Amino acid sequence: MSNPLQEPASALYSIPAKYRGMENLHIVFWIIKDISWCMGWETLGVGMIVPTLFVALFISWRNRHIASELAHNLAVAFWICANSTWMIMEFIQRDKELFFGLLTGKQLSLIPFTLGSLILIYYYLIQRPNEINRRRTTTL
């Protein structure tokens, strides 16, 4: 018996070469940002936020018609925001300072981490089961 949560064997997702190059460049930007954070290179680290986040948002926009891709790419964009918040708070030495009487500067990154997680939870608990049900009803 086949697993209804799996894509049909005939399903295919391909990435055009011009977009694949951009996705690979996105990884390079992200690595440079994180290496800069690790090494304490503040200007480069903060400067790499913009191209890293821009490409993540562009990839999300480009794949907006594919629900699973949109959800995962938006989660990545929120992850970059969270990661960048944490990095900046460390660079300005406010990562241990309390904000809003509730969260440290480092813990402020929980806000975008949570938003990205909520998008994925919504996708896997609500949207994906609905897609599977629609697929089942159209093949019957």
Image (cartoon, grey):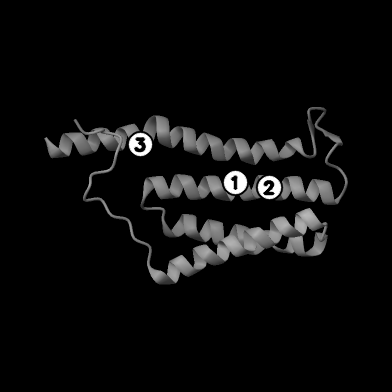
Residue 2: numbered disc: none
Q: Secondary structure at mark 3?
A: helix
Q: In the image, is residue 102 above or below residue 96?
A: above
**Percent position of residue 79, x then y:** 61, 46
In this view, the residue in front, 34 or 71, is 34
**Percent position of residue 71, x then y:** 46, 44
In the drawing, does residue 69 fall left or right of residue 137? right
Task: Specify few, some or many for label 1: CA neighbours under 10 Å numbering under 14, 14-19, or 20 or more.
Answer: many
> To which residue does mark 1 refer?
78
Q: Which of the image's four quarters has the N terminus?
A: top left
Q: Give the alpha-carbon distance from disc 3 to disc 1, as whole Å.
A: 20 Å
**Percent position of residue 37, x then y:** 77, 55
Residue 83: numbered disc: 2
Q: Earlier in the sequence, mark 3 or mark 1?
A: 1
The residue type indicated by label 1 comes to Phe
> To which residue does mark 3 refer?
128
Camera-nearest label, 1 or 2:
2
Label count reads: 3
**Percent position of residue 60, x then y:** 48, 54
Q: Secondary structure at mark 1?
A: helix
Q: Which of the image's four quarters has the C terminus?
A: top left
Residue at position x 80%, y 63% from top?
Answer: 43
Task: Specify few, some or many for label 2: CA neighbours under 10 Å numbering under 14, 14-19, or 20 or more.
Answer: many
Asked whether the residues under the numbered discs 3 and 1 touch, taking CB atoms below 8 Å apart as contact, a structural biologist would say no
Residue at position x 48%, y 33% from top?
Answer: 121
The residue type indicated by label 2 comes to Asn
Asked whether the residues under the numbered discs 2 and 3 touch, taking CB atoms below 8 Å apart as contact, a structural biologist would say no
Q: Secondary structure at mark 2?
A: helix
